[in-house]
């Protein structure tokens, strides 16, 4: 582990639109967050696993999305602390 980040493949990366210290990465082990520009990382305790991509809503930066390799979408409205499967919108 490097600063709390596993030494496996990073599948996705997202940085906060106005705070470059805050970053997220998507990995097989889950979503990891850094509050100090990548020096230290913590895994979302109840976040999804096998994460293929992560994104931050630029208009609401506390809203973070994670997509799994199985095709499920998860959303956090508190900056990655709590996660829930996102509801499907549309047909």
Image (tube, helix red, strand yellow):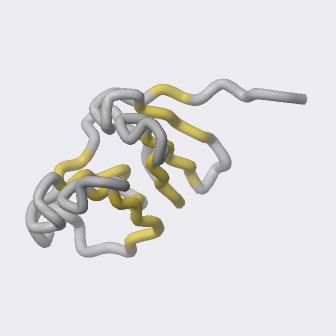
What residue sits 48% from the left and 26% below the top?
84
Place of residue 57 in the rendered image (x, y in percent of width and height, measured from the top left): 49, 44
User: Is 84 left, or right, of 79 in this rendering?
Assistant: right
Look at the picture and state if 62 lies above or below 7. Answer: above
Place of residue 41 in the rendered image (x, y in percent of width and height, measured from the top left): 16, 57
Look at the picture and state if 28 lies above or below 68. Answer: below
Place of residue 71 in the rendered image (x, y in percent of width and height, measured from the top left): 67, 48
Look at the picture and state if 82 lies above or below 68. Answer: above
User: Is 71 left, or right, of 47 in this rendering?
Assistant: right
User: Quarter-wise, where is residue 86 in the image?
Assistant: top right
Look at the picture and state if 16 lies above or below 78. Answer: below
User: Quarter-wise, where is residue 9 in the image?
Assistant: bottom left
**The N terminus lies in quadrant:** bottom left
What residue sits 59% from the left and 40% below the top?
73
What residue sits 45% from the left and 48% below the top?
56
Place of residue 4 in the rendered image (x, y in percent of width and height, measured from the top left): 13, 60
Report the residue that reaches farthest toward the right: 91
Q: Residue 76 or 5: which is nearer the viewer?
A: 76
Q: Residue 31 or 29: which is nearer the viewer?
A: 31
**The C terminus lies in quadrant:** top right
User: Quarter-wise, where is residue 37 in the image?
Assistant: bottom left
What residue sits 53% from the left and 60% below the top?
52
């Amino acid at each position: 582990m490097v600063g709390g980040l596993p030494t496996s493949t990073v599948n996705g990366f997202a940085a906060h639109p106005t705070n470059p210290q805050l970053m997220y990465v998507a990995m097989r082990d889950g979503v990891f967050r850094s509050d100090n520009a990548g020096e230290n990382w913590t895994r979302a305790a109840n976040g999804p696993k096998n994460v293929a991509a992560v994104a931050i809503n630029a208009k609401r930066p506390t809203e973070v999305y994670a997509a799994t390799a199985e095709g499920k979408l998860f959303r956090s409205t508190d900056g990655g602390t709590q996660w829930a499967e996102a509801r499907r919108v549309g047909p």
